[in-house]
Amino acid sequence: MAFEIKRQGRESSQGLVRRFGQRLQRSGILLRARRKRFKTREKSATGKKRRALRREELKAEYLRLEKLGKPSTKRR
């Protein structure tokens, strides 16, 4: 989606750049480009399961240590 901005009468170059920037923002081109640039990949099902199992293991270990009265190694 290309657009053209032409200088109007005695408009300064700064005014032209400002008008161009406003038009660019309103068009949504920058938003689409940023979304595409910083898009994150979907996590695989296996990876999700592994992470969930690891969380459960750590939770059980923290509870065990707490019952024994030992200091928690949990980060806060």
Image (cartoon, rainbow, N blue to C red):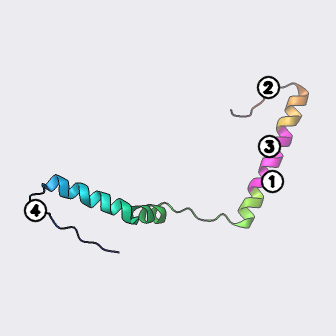
Left or right, residue 66 beside residue 19: right
Crowding near the residue tagged with mark 4, few <14, some 14–19, many ≥20 C-alpha atoms within 10 Å: few
Residue 68 magenta: no
Proximity of marks 2 and 3: CB atoms separated by less than 8 Å: no
Alpha-carbon neighbours of circle 1 within 10 Å: few (<14), some, or many (≥20)? Answer: few
- The three-letter amino acid code for the residue at tag 3 is Leu
Disc 1: which residue: 53
Residues rendered magenta in the picture: 51-61
The part of the image, by quadrant, that contains residue 22 is bottom left
Q: Is residue 24 left or right of residue 47?
A: left
Q: Is residue 47 left or right of residue 14?
A: right
Give the structural element (helix, strand or loop) at label 4: loop
Q: Earlier in the sequence, mark 1 or mark 4?
A: 4
The C terminus appears in which quarter of the rendering?
top right
- What kind of residue is marked 2? Pro
Q: Which residue is mark 3?
A: 58
On screen, residue 67 above or below 45: above
Question: Of 39 and 46, which appears nearest the observer?
Answer: 39
Look at 14% across and 64% down and name the residue there. Answer: 7
Q: Is residue 50 shown above or below 44?
A: above
